[in-house]
């Protein structure tokens, strides 16, 4: 059973860069599928951040594109997210997901990690 | 991109049916049969319940069904059970090659 586990700092200062990692278990990310990040501010709906293929091909949310960098490390079977110049509006639970482009759905989700932006 | 529009809340008694709507535009819901639905009980991650408008992943009860008409997609839950109480979110692929979620609907089982 494929499992996703997010990790990273729970507190980030305004104007700094948020960095998260997602470890993928029981499936090699080199075998296929896109992998992505989705965030959910407290009490609000989810927001798609972006998706990446093991080749490095990416899709980003235009509203975040200028601040987002996603990467994959096939040797560690993990993906990473960097979001620069964060503000309080970036406070959210960040989820790592498997993105099935053939169906345009997100079929597997990590448990999520809460990131708070505050000084 | 604007979020898809969902009613904030719906409710129903055990055994009844409820329908949750999800309204988009001709650039997303209306253009593509690429609508998915997610269930999120409190404190948990969302779970895929419906994909491509009306397909259920393995393990999802057939009490859950989806449909679409024009720019509006719908999720219907029949034979409502207490365990169905959760937040529900729709998602659609868009013509900008992005994916947009709805604001969510809280389902209360009375």
Image: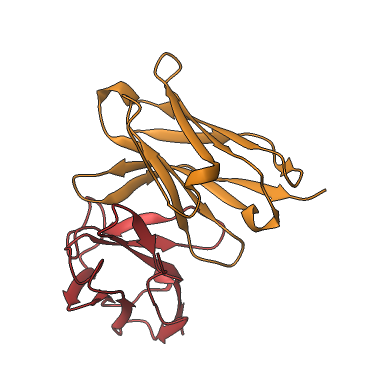
Drawn colour of chain A?
orange
> Which residue does the image show at 23% across and 77% down from the upper left?
B71
Q: Residue A3 or A75: which is nearer the viewer?
A: A75
> Which residue does the image show at 62% across and 40% down from the upper left?
A84
Number of callouts = 0
Applied colour scheme? by chain
Look at the image and tell me whether residue A28 can be seen. no
Q: Residue furthest top?
A: A75
Q: Position of residue B13 (x, y in %)?
A: 39, 86
> Which residue does the image show at 42% across and 13% down from the upper left?
A75
Query: The chain coloured red carries which letter?
Result: B
Relative placement, left or right, of A15 versus B16 is right
Q: Position of residue B53 (x, y in %)?
A: 19, 65
Q: Residue A6 or A51: which is nearer the viewer?
A: A51
Relative placement, left or right, of B26 versus B40 is left
Using the image, determine if residue A85 lies above or below residue A22: below
Q: Quadrant of residue B51?
A: bottom left
Using the image, determine if residue A21 lies above or below residue A48: above
- Image quadrant containing the N terminus of chain B: bottom left
Q: Position of residue A82 (x, y in %)?
A: 56, 36
Q: Residue furthest front?
A: A66
Look at the image and tell me whether residue A100 can be seen. yes
Q: Position of residue A50 (x, y in %)?
A: 42, 44
Q: Residue furthest right?
A: A119
């Amino acid at each position: 059973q494929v499992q996703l586990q997010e990790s990273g700092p729970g507190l980030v200062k305004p104007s700094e860069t948020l960095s998260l990692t997602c470890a993928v278990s029981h499936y090699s990310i080199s075998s296929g599928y896109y992998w992505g990040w989705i965030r959910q501010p407290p009490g609000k709906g989810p927001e798609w951040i972006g998706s990446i293929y093991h080749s490095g091909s990416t899709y980003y949310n235009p509203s975040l594109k200028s601040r987002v960098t996603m990467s994959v490390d096939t040797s560690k079977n993990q993906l990473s997210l960097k979001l620069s110049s964060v503000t309080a509006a970036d406070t959210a639970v960040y989820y790592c997901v498997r993105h099935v482009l053939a169906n345009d759905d997100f079929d597997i989700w990590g448990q999520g990690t809460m990131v708070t932006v505050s000084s | 991109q604007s979020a898809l529009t969902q009613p904030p809340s719906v409710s129903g008694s055990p055994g009844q049916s409820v329908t949750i709507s999800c309204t988009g535009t001709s650039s997303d819901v209306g253009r593509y049969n690429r609508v998915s639905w997610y269930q999120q009980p409190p404190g948990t991650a969302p779970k895929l319940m419906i994909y491509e408008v009306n397909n259920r992943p393995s393990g999802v009860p057939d009490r859950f069904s989806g449909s679409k008409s024009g720019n509006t997609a719908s999720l219907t839950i029949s034979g409502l059970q207490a365990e169905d109480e959760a937040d529900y979110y729709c998602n659609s692929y868009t013509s900008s090659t992005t994916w947009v979620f709805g604001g969510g609907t809280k389902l209360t089982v009375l």
